[in-house]
Amino acid sequence: MDFAFAPLGPTLHWLALVFIFAFLLIGLAIVIVLAALPGQIAARRGHPQAEAINICGWVGLPTGFFWVAALVWAYLNPREDIDATGRLADHVARLETAVALIEANSQEAGS
């Protein structure tokens, strides 16, 4: 009993080899896209640490954990520390003024 496609044997071997290489290239492309994804998201959102997120995405892809951390980090909005510090300083100054007024009123009431 002969195999019906026996004459196509060498062609089928080459075709299988082409498919294997095509799947390997597709897999490599998927890995590259996934590794670069957190950095691209961070850059698109204007994140100040976009380069660090990009590196974390590339280094973290083999482990998985750091890649997920980079993806979450890319979506986090950076805090405005400079603005917050100024607001806190204003708030502390108002509280100090209020405490000074309360102390002055309590001293006047005690006299």
Image (tube, helix red, strand yellow):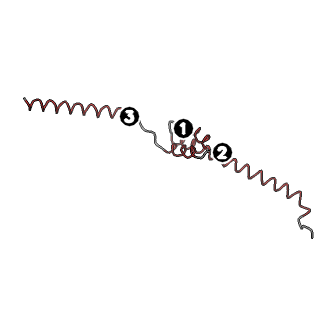
Earlier residue among tags 2 and 1: 2
Q: Estimate the x, y position of residue 83 in percent, counting from the top left.
A: 38, 34
Residue marked by disc 3: 83
- State the residue at coordinates (68%, 47%): 29
- State the residue at coordinates (17%, 31%): 101
Tell me: 88 left or right of 31.
left
Q: Estimate the x, y position of residue 40 in percent, counting from the top left.
A: 57, 42
Which quadrant of the figure has residue 43?
A: top right
Q: Secondary structure at mark 1?
A: helix
Q: Secondary structure at mark 3?
A: helix
Real-space Cα separation, disc 3 to disc 2, in angstroms: 38 Å
Q: Estimate the x, y position of residue 9 in percent, counting from the top left.
A: 89, 60
Nearer to me, 104 or 11? 104
Earlier residue among tags 3 and 2: 2
Real-space Cα separation, disc 3 to disc 1, in angstroms: 21 Å
- State the residue at coordinates (83%, 56%): 15
Q: Which residue type does callout 2 highlight?
A: Ile
Q: Residues within 10 Å of mark 2 (few under 14, many from 20)?
A: few
Give the tally of numbered discs.
3
Q: Secondary structure at mark 2?
A: helix
Residue marked by disc 2: 32
Q: Which residue type does callout 3 highlight?
A: Asp
Residue marked by disc 1: 50
Q: Which residue type does callout 1 highlight?
A: Ala
Which quadrant of the figure has residue 36?
A: top right
Real-space Cα separation, disc 2 to disc 1, in angstroms: 17 Å
